Image: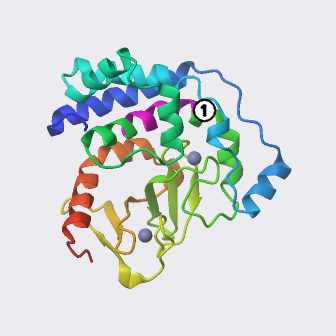
């Protein structure tokens, strides 16, 4: 998936983040326009503000190709393989994005996981920029779902305030944050604490991974002082080793606390 070896993975992720910063720095695109009345009525009926299948994310393909180039230059075999497949016309990028957004993309295997990672990173800069107003608008609104109130996508990471214990989920695509109950799985809404657990790694006490024994889902969690100021992508990418551990916990049936 990500280049193997901790130094190489860190170097790759640093390049991914610097590409994202570069793109965000030069983007000038119109914000998504949803009026206040629509915001209120959609949120109160449990409908996200945007339907991602109806908006065009123009920049995603350029970012996708640049990420593949970075991976190829670092000798990351899957990047080269995907790039060659695209050059041979074996897949259509826009179709792949639609499948991904509909949740129809496979989630198992190194290649599928790597493509999902690339697509997430490719869609994110434009979505983050164009949803600034909408993300602000949902901050203090009630939304009890596990999917993002702005774009409907799933969370990448959770944040827990060490001051008041409140928990926020962060959208993996647009970076919206919303308050969510502490004892509830974001993926299946399970609230039975006997079927929820977590694990921590020695020396990395600011992270924990919450697991749900009912649906097999997990979410990485950062315990921090000011959840609104934490960069979710930096935390998500810096803790990729916890994704691997979480999958081992789940597939091995290792009981968490
Ligand atoms: Zn979102
Ligand atoms: Zn669950």
Classify residue 133 as left or right of residue 236: right
Q: Residues within 10 Å of mark 1 (few under 14, many from 20)?
A: some
Q: Is 254 or 181 nearer to us in this picture?
A: 254
Q: Which residue is mark 1?
A: 129
Identify the residue at image location x=44%, y=34%: 119
Whether disc 1's CB lies below 8 Å from ligand 1 is answered no
Q: Is residue 22 visible?
A: no
Residue 41 location (% of width, % of height) = 81, 57
Magenta segment: does it hold 118? yes
Give the SS element for disc 1. helix
**Vertical arrangement, residue 131 with respect to residue 178, above or below:** above
Q: Which residues are magenta?
A: 117-126
Residue 21 location (% of width, % of height) = 46, 27
Which residue is the extreme one toward the left? 5
Magenta span main SS = helix
Kindly indicate the quadrant of the structure image that contains residue 73. top left
Classify residue 67 as left or right of residue 81: right
Residue 129 location (% of width, % of height) = 60, 32
Magenta segment: does it hold 30? no
Identify the residue at image location x=48%, y=23%: 61
Residue 183 location (% of width, % of height) = 46, 76
Identify the residue at image location x=44%, y=83%: 192
Q: Quadrant of the C terminus?
A: bottom left
Q: Quadrant of the N terminus?
A: top left
Q: Is 98 or 23 nearer to us in this picture?
A: 98
């Amino acid at each position: 998936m990500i280049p193997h070896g901790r130094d190489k993975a860190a170097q790759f992720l640093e390049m991914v983040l610097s590409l994202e910063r570069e793109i965000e720095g030069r983007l000038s695109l119109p914000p998504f326009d949803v009026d206040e009345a629509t915001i209120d009525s959609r949120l109160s009926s449990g409908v996200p503000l945007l339907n991602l299948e109806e908006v065009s994310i123009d920049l995603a393909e350029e970012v996708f190709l640049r990420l593949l180039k970075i991976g190829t230059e670092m000798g990351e075999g899957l990047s080269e393989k995907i790039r060659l497949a695209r050059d041979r016309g074996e897949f259509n990028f826009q179709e792949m994005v639609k499948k991904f957004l509909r949740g129809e993309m496979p989630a198992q295997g190194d290649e599928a996981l790597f493509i999902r990672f690339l697509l997430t990173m490719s869609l994110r800069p434009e979505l983050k920029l164009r949803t600034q107003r909408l993300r602000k608008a949902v901050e203090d609104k009630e939304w009890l779902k596990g999917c993002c109130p702005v774009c409907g996508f799933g969370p990448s990471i959770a944040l827990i305030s060490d001051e008041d214990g409140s928990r926020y989920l962060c959208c993996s695509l647009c970076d919206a944050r919303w308050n969510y109950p502490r004892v509830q799985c974001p993926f299946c809404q399970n609230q039975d604490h006997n079927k929820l657990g977590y694990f921590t790694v020695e020396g990395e006490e600011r992270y924990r991974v919450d697991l749900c024994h009912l649906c097999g889902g997990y979410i990485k969690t950062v315990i921090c002082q000011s959840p609104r100021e934490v960069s979710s992508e930096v935390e998500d990418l810096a803790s990729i080793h916890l994704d691997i551990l979480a999958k081992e916990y789940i597939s091995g049936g290792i009981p968490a606390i």
